[in-house]
Image (cartoon, helix red, strand yellow):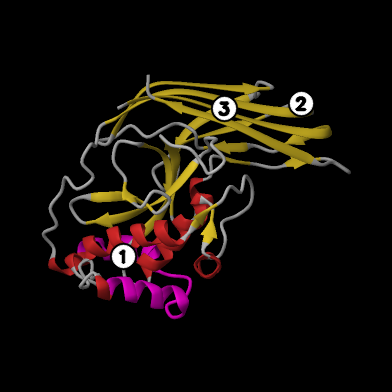
Amino acid sequence: MLFHIRHSTLYTYSRPVALDPHTLRLRPRHDGSQALKHYTLEILPGPSGLTEFTDLEGNAASQVWFADLTDKLRINLIAEVETLRENPFDFVLTDPGVMSLPVRYPASVRASLTPYCQPVQRDGPVAWYAEEIARDAGNDTLRFLMALAGDLYERTDMVVRKTGEPQAPEFTLKQGSGAGRDLAVLFIEACRTLGLAARFASGYWNGTAPDGQQYLHAWAEVYFPQVGWRGYDPSCGLAVADQHVLVASGLYPGSAASITGAFWGSDVHSTMTTTVSVHAP
């Protein structure tokens, strides 16, 4: 499916400030699941320098820096992306250690995946919840992942939180409500308590939030040997296929942040506004 994406972020400051170098992760991935057809990035005021690089997690990133004081920073993205994976289950698991829970990854990938398998808490409400879902799924890994995504979708009220870090996973589970990033973090934590390598993914979704608007979206990815990272979205209760456009992913939510940076100034307050449009012509 072909998507046209527009994403605008505007920071305004109550008085002119100096901007630290900013890191941008806004370029959608170009891989076996999606093809980047067009990408334009506009930054105002124009930076005095820009360098493109690949970050630790394999995301396409840019560092930009600025010479002059400014009272605003606007970053506009226009992209055209074709998603290619119509069937999210177009793979076969062959390693018996991955087919059932708790997962035991082969030695060839275990060391690389260890950070993605470490939950915040190995015991407690999230671990008990994951064990219950796993038992109902017969400890089958793929059945568990779909059951977990579906159960979180059914039991959780979606809300819009335009700013702020993700909630603690046990808080989201207890409250029964959260934004997309909150559900993603809870899904990841539940997976990790059972040995599954999971990470945070950020990008765009061909859907709307509870307020009818579109925002940057978040979901989870799980790693399978010889298959790679595959997405699961508890906000939709589904495995990720051709309705999602991946931009960045990482061990922590901050590892996939679209824009990171700071400003310098005295007695300054700032505001941020964003607009996102994702549509298939």
- Identify the main secondary structure in magenta: helix
Q: Which mark is residue 68?
A: 2
Mark 2 or 3, nearer chain start: 3
Q: Quadrant of the C terminus?
A: top left
Q: CA distance from mark 2 to mark 3?
A: 15 Å
Q: Within the magenta stretch, is there residue 227?
A: no
Q: Within the magenta stretch, is there residue 130?
A: yes
Count of numbered tags: 3
Answer with left or right where residue 60 lies relative to residue 197: right
Q: Residue furthest bottom?
A: 123
SS of the residue at dot 2? loop
Mark 2 or 1, nearer chain start: 2
Give the answer, above or below, for where 273 lies relative to 179. above
The image position of residue 279, as x and y in percent, is: 42, 25
State yes or no: discs 2 and 3 in contact (Cβ < 8 Å): no
Q: Identity of the amino acid at label 3?
A: Leu
The image position of residue 253, as x and y in percent, is: 51, 53
SS of the residue at dot 1? loop
